[in-house]
Amino acid sequence: MAGPRTKAESPDRTAAEALAIATLAYLAGEPEELERFLAVTGLGPDNLRRAAKDRDFLAAVLDHVTAYEPLLLRCAAALSLSPAAFDRARRELSPPNDWDYS
């Protein structure tokens, strides 16, 4: 019998990764946006595919899109999603912080 799912295997995590990959595909279809994204990340087209397998990179894709509202709105419209879906996915993929506010 299989054990409980870990956070990495959760449906929410899988959906967040799928959204980040779809977002990256959207950026790839928009040459100016892709160029801007590559400039910010320091990546080139040749190593983008390898980077897309990394959870932290996928979180960075969503960070990039959610940081600029016009881009977020265009991407959300293109993917037929609400802008809030991108923020939820970003939070799912982002590592937790160690700040204690108590």
Image: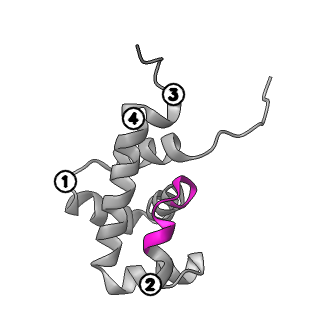
Residue under label 3? 6
- Is residue 22 depicted above or below 39 in this figure? above
Q: Earlier in the sequence, mark 4 or mark 3?
A: 3
Q: Amino acid at mark 2?
A: Pro
Rendered image quadrant of residue 29: bottom left
Residue under label 1? 80
Q: Earlier in the sequence, mark 4 or mark 2?
A: 4
C-alpha separation, residue under disc 4 versus residue under disc 1: 18 Å
- Is residue 71 depicted above or below 39 in this figure? above
C-alpha separation, residue under disc 2 versus residue under disc 1: 26 Å
Please state the extent of the stretch shown in magenta in the rendering. Answer: 49-57
Q: Residues within 10 Å of mark 3 (few under 14, many from 20)?
A: few
Q: Residues within 10 Å of mark 2 (few under 14, many from 20)?
A: few
Residue under label 2? 45
User: What x and y, as percent, mark residue 69?
Assistant: 41, 62
- The circle on residue 34 is none
